[in-house]
Amino acid sequence: MSPIRRDSKPSGPQRGRSASGGTRSDAGAPGENKGPRALAEILSQLNVLRGHGRSQGNRQLAELWERIAGPEISGRTKVIGLRNGALVVGVSSTALLGELTSFHSHQLLEALRGDSEGRRIKGLKFQLRSSATGSGGRST
């Protein structure tokens, strides 16, 4: 007796597709609420998509860096951002890069972690950047 073979494709229209083969605009992820949503939720998603929270977060990081590093160091560096828990800072010269990496990184990291705003920082990385000048991450 030979085994019965069944076609694995369903005979009716597939989920997310109309009978004409195009995608339906109301198809969504399973469990997605298709009813009205709160305006606050929509605005929050819009802010995330446009990166507004990121720029505000970078501004806060730059202010924290300026406060911790002081005017001499922060004037020759620029906060690039937070990547995988490490604060990435652009440095204006190789001499400063060597000095910060060799002599100051441990103290700066401990000072950042000691600040209430810097507790989420797990590491400190310096990168050579020719445009890493300005006060607290703002180019001059």
Image (cartoon, helix red, strand yellow):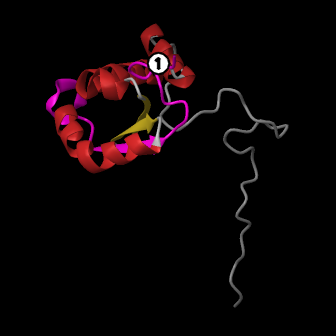
Q: Residue furthest right?
A: 20
Quarter holding residue 96: top left
For this rendering, which residue is in front, 13 or 68? 68
- Residue 47, above or below 77: above
According to the picture, the residue beneath numbered tag 1 turns out to be: 138
Q: Residues within 10 Å of mark 1 (few under 14, many from 20)?
A: some
- Residue 84, above or below 115: below
Residue 3 appears at what percent x and percent y?
A: 68, 83
Span highlighted in magenta in the image: 113-140
Q: Evaluate whether residue 84 shows in this view.
A: no
Q: Determine whether, in the image, residue 18 is placed left or right of residue 34.
A: right
The verdict on residue 120 being magenta is yes
Which residue: 18% across, 40% down?
Answer: 107
Identified by mark 1, the residue type is: Arg
Residue 128 appears at what percent x and percent y?
A: 49, 42
SS at mark 1 in the image: loop
Q: Evaluate whether residue 127 shows in this view.
A: yes
Q: Determine whether, in the image, residue 140 is placed left or right of residue 79.
A: right
